[in-house]
Amino acid sequence: MKFIILLSTVCLASIGELVLARHSNLHEWVQYKKVHGKVYEAPEEDSQRFSLFLAAKEQIRKHNAKPEASYRLALNHLSDLTPEEAAKSKGFIYDPVKHMKRLGASKYDPFLQEILADPAPVPDEIDWRKVPGRVTTVKNQGGCASCWAFSTTGLLEGQQVVRNITKQLVSLSEQDLVDCSQSDYGCGGGDMDSALADIEKMGGIESEKDYPYKFGEARSLGDDECHFKKSKAVMTDSGSVDLPENDHDVIRATVAKYGPVAIALEANESFRAYSSGIFDDPKCGTALDHAVLIVGYGKCPKHGDYYIVKNSWGENWGERGYIRIKPGVCGVGSVAIISKF
């Protein structure tokens, strides 16, 4: 009899803990939706999103429980997205055949030879954010797979003043590229080399002020929605150079001497949940699907070298819109691009 009573007490306690846990999760879910402006009218969708939220929360809990981890994860506005929606937060299209051709063509490019032959010493660390008028504020691509456009504009923005192309920093138009880059696919994805080539063909790119971003209201290939006006172009380029694959000495030297460098990487689940620290996920592969921007680099006594990378997911992601990531992790260094002028 005592055993039955004890068993009943244990069962009731377990049920009580489950009820409390669910109540706590539901409360967190309500707060999460409020913070991130999420509204789901249909109960079925709310339930589906809640499940995605719980899965993300558990992944974060498991990782953050590791005392040796060099980075932390946290819930953010991406935590309840479906896989299809998560893909739209990225958008880099990697074509290995085209990439190899571009590497081959870049190998003998005079500008790359200039970079490789530059005898100026390379500083141990650099952060272009700390130099006034070098890097624009963090932007947000929203639900449009236009990371390639943000990486391209960030590249040009960061080099405007560093390389004395313009006298002052001007925020450039991603929507210009989303609408008008005929070699890319708007909100269906693209790549930075193609975008830079199209800017050269069009004769320039407009400012963000004159051609503002529409957060996903973008053309499909073949539509007639390009509103680019050459008379309003604030700068142009002469194409691009692909830096040697995974040559981090060259990447660091280029960032230090010529300004930010556009790169591609794999943005896996851990990357999307990144909150702080030096990202070093051994499970992150080289399925390049996201384009970002290196704006600096440094070295941590405990965790070694890292790049400072500007993302296009808003200031509420990561370290105020940035991530510090180890060279080589998530394929960083496989594709690294700088523009020519």
Image (spheres, rainbow, N blue to C red):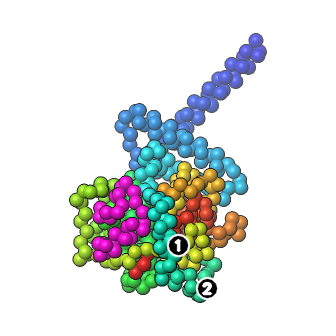
Tell me if mark 1 has few (under 14), some (14-19) or many (20+) residues whose alpha carbon lies within 10 angstroms of its own. many
Reply above or below: 240 against 27: below
Residue flagged by tag 1: what amino acid is it? Leu
Q: Quadrant of the N terminus?
A: top right
Judging depth in this view, the residue of 53 and 250 nearest the camera is: 250
Instruction: Look at the numbered disc 2 and give the secondary structure of its residue.
Output: loop
Instruction: Tell me where the magenta segment starts and ends, as one range.
Output: 179-206
Residue shown at 58% from the left, 33% from the top: 20
Residue flagged by tag 2: what amino acid is it? Pro
Reply above or below: 225 against 33: below
Judging depth in this view, the residue of 141 and 184 nearest the camera is: 184
Measured from the top left, where is residue 332 in percent x and y? 56, 63
Q: Is residue 142 visible?
A: no
Measured from the top left, where is residue 260 in percent x and y? 49, 74
Q: Is residue 103 visible?
A: yes
Measured from the top left, where is residue 327 in percent x and y? 61, 66
Quadrant housing residue 212:
bottom left
Q: Disc 2 to disc 1, how far (Cα)?
A: 19 Å
* Residue linked to disc 2: 121
Q: Which label belongs to residue 243?
A: 1
